[in-house]
Image (cartoon, grey):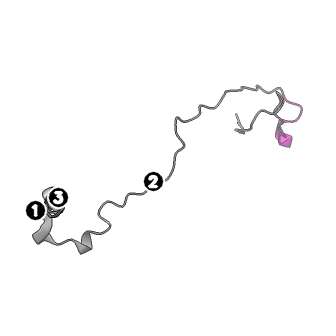
């Protein structure tokens, strides 16, 4: 059994199929299923995680967790 899959948008309640000659003169079954729309469009998301690791300074990694608080605290003391 040969099958053809064709995804179309229904316009004015109609879809149009041009079938190959091997289907001509034969009885065929037409099944119509609505496509499920994804909740959000699928994008090929790429992560930048680790992209700058070549510039990392291991000696400063321990200070990263408190860097913002230390910087903000110094600014407040001078203001």
Considering the image in quadrants, where does the N terminus appear?
Answer: top right
Q: Pointer 1: what residue? A: 62
Residue 70 is drawn in which quadrant? bottom left
> Which residue is more in the foreground, 16 or 29?
16
Left or right relative to 3: residue 75: left
The spot of residue 3 in percent (x, y) is 70, 36
Q: Are marks 2 and 1 in contact (CB under 8 Å)?
A: no
Observer-side mark, 3 or 2, equals 3
Q: Pointer 3: what residue? A: 76
Q: In the picture shown, does residue 60 fall above or below 70?
A: below
Q: Earlier in the sequence, mark 3 or mark 2?
A: 2
Residue 29 is drawn in which quadrant? top right
Q: How far apart are the two marked residues, 3 and 1, measured between alpha carbons?
A: 23 Å
Q: Earlier in the sequence, mark 3 or mark 1?
A: 1
> Which residue is more in the foreground, 31 or 10?
10
The spot of residue 73 in percent (x, y) is 14, 58
Q: Pointer 2: what residue? A: 45
Q: Are marks 3 and 1 in contact (CB under 8 Å)?
A: no
Residue 34 is drawn in which quadrant? top right
Q: Magenta-highlighted stretch: main secondary structure?
A: loop
**Magenta residue span:** 18-26
Query: Which element type, helix, strand or loop, lies under badge 1?
Result: helix
Left or right relative to 69: residue 11: right
Rate crowding at label 1 as few (under 14), some (14 to 19) or many (20 or more) other CA atoms within 10 Å. few
Q: How far apart are the two marked residues, 2 and 1, measured between alpha carbons?
A: 30 Å
The spot of residue 32 in percent (x, y) is 71, 26
Rate crowding at label 2 as few (under 14), some (14 to 19) or many (20 or more) other CA atoms within 10 Å. few
Observer-side mark, 3 or 1, equals 3
Q: Is residue 51 magenta?
A: no
Q: How far apart are the two marked residues, 3 and 2, measured between alpha carbons?
A: 39 Å
């Amino acid at each position: 059994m040969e099958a053809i899959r064709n995804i179309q948008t229904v316009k004015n309640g109609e879809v149009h199929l041009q079938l190959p000659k091997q289907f001509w003169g034969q009885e065929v079954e037409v099944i119509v299923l609505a496509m499920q729309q994804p909740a959000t469009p699928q994008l090929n998301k790429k992560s930048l995680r680790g992209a700058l690791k070549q510039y990392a300074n291991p000696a400063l990694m321990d200070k990263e967790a408190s860097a913002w608080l230390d910087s903000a605290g110094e600014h407040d003391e001078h203001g």
